[in-house]
Amino acid sequence: MKWHNRIEILTLLLTTLWGTLQGEVTVFYIIYLFWFQELVRTVINVGYAYATGMEDGTKPVTRDWTGNIFILFIYVVFIILLFGFMLNWDNLHLMSINMQTLFFRNWSFNANLMLFAVQYFLYRKNTGTQAPDLKIFNRNHIILHVSIITGALLQMMVLNKYPEYFSGNVLWGSGLVVLPFLLLRVLMPQRQ
């Protein structure tokens, strides 16, 4: 499992760095990416659990994964409304990047998501009978929740006060925007 976490973190760091250099990374980008990674992880885990069964030979409990999807649905509505629109309403440049990300027109986001999906699928295929975590509000949801709170505070307190440094036009500003989220992901790797 450790090799998988290292590959996931390395992939995340490299593709996010590439996106930052291209001026394609915003707070919405990174939080939406974390959300989408959790959705991909959940879908692959549910598919794996139904295809192979759990360790005791039973199928996963439906309420576990449907509750998981329900929580993710609530998160995505909040993420899109707050980070995609409301907090960037007066910055057309950031809104443009957010809409490109939302509609899969941001190539660094797409690459990050595709690489994650492939490497997680391969991880799940190679782990054998290890049961996936499908419970409602698991560790990965807590990491996503902390990212949303951190992102909202960062956006409201820092980004809105100094918008010229964090608009995506100043490279080091974009790097500073992403840094707290990357540190959170590196220091608290997600559970599989």
Image (tube, grey):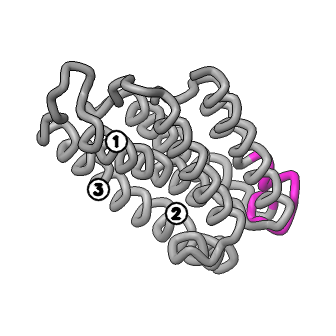
Determine the CA span between mark 1 and mark 2: 38 Å
At mark 3, the secondary structure is: helix
Callout 2: few (<14), some (14-19), or many (20+) C-alpha neighbours within 10 Å? Answer: some
State left or right for residue 165 relative to residue 91.
right
For numbered disc 1, what is the local secondary structure? helix
Q: Which residues are magenta?
A: 165-176
Identified by mark 1, the residue type is: Tyr
Which badge, 1 or 2, comes first in the chain's sequence?
1
Quadrant of residue 136 in the image? top left
The amino acid type of the residue labelled 2 equals: Leu
Q: Which residue is mark 1?
A: 48
Mark on residue 58? none
- Of the 4 image quadrants, the one containing the C terminus is top left
Sequence-earlier tag: 1 or 3: 1
Counting from the top left corner in percent of width and height, residue 5 is at: 62, 29
Residue 86 position, x and y percent, is 46, 67
Residue in the image at 72% along x and 44% along y? 11
- In the picture provided, is 144 more to the left or to the right than 183? left
Q: Residue at x 35, y 51 (%)?
A: 75
